[in-house]
Image (spheres, rainbow, N blue to C red):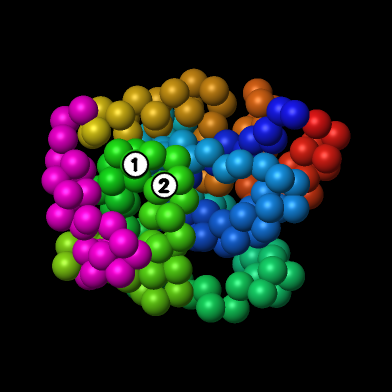
Amino acid sequence: MKTKSIELIFDFVSPNAYLVWQPLRALAARQGAQIHITPAFLGGMHKLTGNAPPFIRDADVKGKNAYANLEMQRFIAKHGLHRYKMNPKFPFNSINLLRMLVSLESDDQIKFIDALIPAIWEDGLDVTDVAAVATVLTKAGFDAESLAAKAQDPAIKQAVIDSTEKAVERGVFGIPTFFIGEEMFFGKERLGQIEEMLEKS
């Protein structure tokens, strides 16, 4: 029997990446699907595509950001994500976290995200505070010093650049984006469509 697979194009800096994470984990469990992470630097993606964060892009469109916030609150209520709060350092530079992430094997990538996502989007972790990040990672069982060293490896740095560029070449313009095979889905609101597709596979 073929294992179902969900590819997630991911960056820690996106609030929607946090909001979709636990619902996606639950969906994958229901469907017997594996989640595969593709790290991609959202700032670099925006430069390559000409995209911008919605709160900036839609600032002059009357009512649009207010409605987007309403939809976010509905999503939070539906999935019980009431611990979510905007990180005080947002928008922060996530590049070192992505470099650490890309250096890990698949199972450890999931564990890494599980550790950092709530720390960032529930506890207000300052990702530029090396000691604070190391404390979170050590508590989760990682060798924080080793990961920090890997993040400075030129090959790892290039891997994040390559991963971001390849995602854009595939049509990705924002986070979170998902692939089921070659079928692309953008945004946390597409979970229903993703589940329907998995049910048919």
Q: Is residue 140 magenta?
A: yes
Looking at the image, residue 90 lies above or below residue 150: below
Left-right relation of 92 to 176: left
The main secondary structure of the magenta stretch is helix
Name the residue: 66% across, 26% down: 181
Q: Is residue 29 magenta?
A: no
Where residue 104 sits, quadrant-wise, is top left
Q: Which residue in the structure is indicated by mark 2?
A: 109
Q: Amino acid at mark 1?
A: Leu
Determine whether label 1 and label 2 are within 8 Å by CB: yes
What number is the disc on residue 104? 1
**Sequence-wise, which precedes: disc 1 or disc 2?**
1
SS at mark 1 in the image: loop
Left-right relation of 4 to 140: right
SS at mark 2 in the image: helix
Task: Name the spot of residue 21 as percent of width and height, x first.
Answer: 57, 57
Residue 190, visible in the rendered structure: no
Stretch of the chain drawn in magenta: 132-155
Where residue 179 sits, quadrant-wise, is top right
Where residue 113 sits, quadrant-wise, is bottom left
Looking at the image, residue 90 lies above or below residue 100: below
Looking at the image, residue 186 lies above or below residue 132: above
